[in-house]
Image (cartoon, helix red, strand yellow):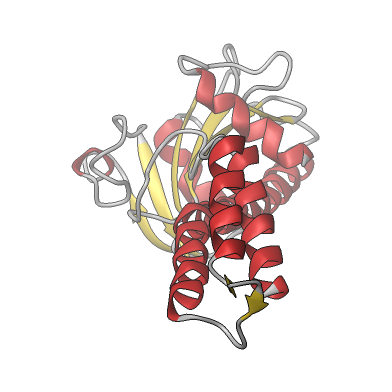
Amino acid sequence: MRAVVLCSYLVFQYLFNCGLLTKSRIEQTLKQVQGDNFVHGHKKAGFTLAEVLLVITIIGVVASLTIPNLVQNIQDQQLKAAWKKTYNILSEATDQIREENGGTIRDAWYNGGAIIPVYENYIKVIKRCNWPQAALNDCWASTTDSPLIAGAILIDGTFIQVDGSFDCMFGCGHIVVDVNGKKSPNECGIDIFKFDVLEKRNLPSGAQDSYWMPKACWANSSKYLLE
């Protein structure tokens, strides 16, 4: 009986901390559980069916409250890890392009449509989507914002979209990444991230001096890289 009461108390304490039960309600329930196990001053042996059902119910309530959050947290961590991995791959490729182009990205490509062919020398691409394929969602989820000028699917299923210019007037290029392809949620800052390719460095959105941030959610691109 003590184990049942202790279990009930711990679970009720959790629900109280979450604001799901009041203190008076918890005390009332615990007294009832304790009282039901005494008949004429004598303690009953074993557990009653009511006690077992109570514990099962409590466990079910706690599971329904915690498991969805646990699953969501795991998924969030997986998406963050995928973004870090993809950023490192693309960032290293960009650094190589820059190094082999005299230390600058300027003139590494003549327009946005020429960016993917340049990157194909450094990363594994299984499909290239130029305009209008990119706009027709061959390489991008149809539920998200309009894609950029060109895109590609990487060997691990990651989608990327790119745009840029040769003169680097407003940044040499922009690369948007959907780390899990067309799988949901397809939302900026959750599974879709972005970084800018500048003449001398790479800059995740949300970092100081980053370009092209119409949505605040792009700031997660730099935030998650620091976690």
Quarter of the image with the N terminus in it? bottom right
Above or below, comparing residue 21 to residue 90 in the picture: above
Residue 207: x %, y % from top left: 71, 22
In this picture, residue 145 sits left or right of residue 209: left
- Report whether residue 84 is seen: yes
Q: Residue at the location (44% across, 58% down)?
A: 64
Quarter of the image with the C terminus in it? top right
Q: Depth check: 101 or 222 in front?
A: 222
In this picture, residue 157 sits left or right of residue 25: left
Residue 204: x %, y % from top left: 66, 30
Above or below, comparing residue 135 to residue 52 in the picture: above
Residue 180: x %, y % from top left: 44, 56
Q: Residue at the location (58% across, 12% down)?
A: 169
Q: Residue at the location (47% across, 47% down)?
A: 116
Q: Depth check: 66 or 223 in front?
A: 66
Q: Quadrant of residue 173?
A: top right
Above or below, comparing residue 53 to residue 178 in the picture: below
- Report whether residue 107 is seen: no
Residue ranking furthest to the bottom: 45
Residue 137: x %, y % from top left: 24, 46
Q: Residue at the location (59% across, 60% down)?
A: 123
